[in-house]
């Protein structure tokens, strides 16, 4: 019998890799819903190929455009209903017929529907790490309380999941685990100096040496905030402390992460830098299916390198670690400040080095508050965005003055 999957963020990089895995297994998986945001034409093209029951778009105007495009192709509305807005994202994540949900919306926008999938007891394929960073304890509780399944799609966490004991029960000591070795490519600016970083452009930042990804995560990878978010993600997913996760810069991105045990063993997962591997693993677990990924040729790779991260030049990693250790709303504040800073960098409003500076300033202003509910998380997110936007105005004024001098 086919399994029904909803792909949140179907028009993005992870979304299209997911559709490629589905394409290879048309009887095993059927598409329940696809969601998009700005790339309506791509969404409609995917609908024509995968015939979902629902499409979800952000506005009535986008829905009209979607319906017009569907009508032009002769597919008609009967086969595919177009829904609008966040409630619809949550509906297609939690409907009774849905077996699994690929959470691949970028940023905080993915939190509510991803949580809805967890609360409805679905298999959650988690690419949207920001959702977990923002609301880790709430999210993990929702998974547990509703017997949902959480399969990490982020390549590092997928590798850790594969390297942990099969019966892993959220307890490092019990399983003789010493630490997680979280690998990082180092991004496009590895080995650059601060002075060099002050001049880098958005185009340079999104040109990742190993992985092809959306713009936001590519910038996160360049600042090392991606590794910071992943450190928090690992602590929530596997129930460990930040000092039990060691970041290892490994420029080839062949080892996707490792687990170190107290008998001296280190277990790793290796593979191509191709997200279809963790996606297919999450979809088929505990079975394995063809993902269309080229086999790893160790002779072609020939060597693997490892170094420590440069915390001085790339402060985002420690900002994230501090936020996790502060707990409560701090990771949500960090995430929101980062989203605003990255968007401003991509829009050429601020320079690359202003990203950690802006986050540091917002974190310094943030009160310490515990999280009891989703509303607490959303309020912290909103507060941090407002503070970051105020600071952006200040940063721009400073840049203008510097430009006039
Ligand atoms: P993309 O930017 O390529 O895709 C993002 C998706 O989210 C698109 O479908 C986009 O729609 C949709 N979207 C954007 N904003 C909104 C919004 N406000 N409301 C609803 N939908 C929205 O990102 P990636 O695929 O690269 O990343 C997706 C997630 O997966 C991120 O959280 C990222 O950190 C994580 N991830 C990605 C990896 C990768 O290799 N790409 C690796 C590991 C994790 P549209 O395009 O139509 O505007
Ligand atoms: Mg990753």
Image (cartoon, rainbow, N blue to C red):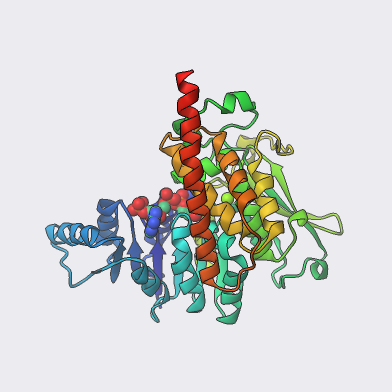
Residue 282 locus on image (x, y percent)? 53, 64
176 relative to 9 in the view: left or right: right
Which sits in the foreground, 118 or 209? 118
Residue under the point 51% across and 57% down: 383
Which sits in the foreground, 261 or 131? 131
Residue under the point 36% across and 67% down: 86
Question: Residue 328, located in which quarter of the rendered image?
Answer: bottom right
Residue under the point 62% across and 44% down: 360
Residue 167 locus on image (x, y percent)? 71, 73
Residue 215 versus residue 180 in the image, above or below: above
**Which residue in the rendered view is the most extreme toward the right?**
263
Please say whether residue 207 is visible from this viewpoint. Answer: no
40 relative to 342 in the view: left or right: left
Specify the quadrant that holds the N terminus: bottom left
Residue 143 locus on image (x, y percent)? 57, 75
How many numbered discs sit on the rendered protein? 0
Please say whether residue 335 is visible from this viewpoint. Answer: yes
Which sits in the foreground, 133 or 227? 133
Residue under the point 57% across and 69% down: 150
85 relative to 251 in the view: left or right: left
Residue 387 versus residue 236 in the image, above or below: above
Residue 260 versus residue 221 in the image, above or below: below
Residue 58 locus on image (x, y percent)? 31, 60
């Amino acid at each position: 019998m086919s399994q029904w999957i909803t792909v949140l963020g179907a028009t993005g990089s992870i979304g299209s890799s997911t559709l490629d895995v589905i394409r290879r297994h048309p009887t095993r998986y059927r598409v329940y819903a696809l969601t998009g945001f700005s790339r309506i034409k791509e969404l409609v093209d995917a609908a024509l190929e995968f015939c979902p029951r629902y499409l979800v778009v952000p506005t009535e105007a986008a829905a009209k455009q979607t319906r017009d495009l569907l009508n032009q192709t002769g597919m008609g509305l009967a086969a595919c209903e177009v829904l609008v807005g966040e409630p619809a994202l949550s509906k297609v994540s939690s409907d009774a017929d849905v077996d699994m949900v690929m959470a691949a919306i970028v940023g905080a926008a993915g939190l509510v529907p991803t949580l809805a999938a967890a609360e409805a007891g679905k298999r959650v394929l988690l690419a949207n790490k920001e959702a977990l960073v923002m609301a880790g304890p709430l999210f993990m509780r929702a998974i547990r309380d509703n017997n949902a399944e959480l399969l990490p799609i982020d390549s590092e966490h997928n590798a850790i999941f594969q390297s942990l004991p099969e019966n892993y029960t959220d307890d490092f000591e019990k399983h003789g685990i010493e630490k997680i070795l979280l690998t990082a490519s180092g991004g496009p600016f590895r080995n650059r100096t601060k002075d060099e970083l002050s001049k880098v452009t958005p185009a340079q930042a999104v040109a990742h040496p190993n992985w092809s990804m959306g713009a936001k995560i590519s910038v996160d990878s360049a600042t090392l905030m991606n590794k910071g978010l992943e450190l928090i993600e690992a602590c929530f997913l596997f129930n460990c402390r930040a000092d039990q996760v060691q970041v290892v810069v490994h420029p080839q991105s062949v080892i996707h992460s490792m687990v170190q045990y107290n008998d001296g063993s280190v277990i790793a997962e290796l593979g191509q830098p191709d997200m279809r591997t963790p996606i297919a693993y999450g979809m088929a677990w505990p079975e394995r299916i063809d993902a269309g990924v080229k086999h790893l040729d160790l002779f072609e790779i020939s060597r693997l390198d490892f170094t420590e991260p440069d915390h001085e030049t790339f402060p985002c990693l420690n900002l994230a670690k501090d936020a996790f250790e502060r707990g409560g709303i701090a990771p949500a504040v960090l995430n929101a400040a980062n989203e605003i800073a990255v968007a401003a960098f991509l829009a050429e409003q601020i320079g690359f080095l202003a990203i950690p500076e802006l986050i540091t300033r917002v974190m310094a202003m943030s009160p310490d508050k515990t999280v009891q509910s989703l509303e607490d998380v959303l309020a912290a997110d909103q507060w941090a965005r407002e503070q970051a936007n105020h600071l952006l105005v200040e940063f721009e004024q400073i840049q203008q003055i510097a430009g006039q001098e």
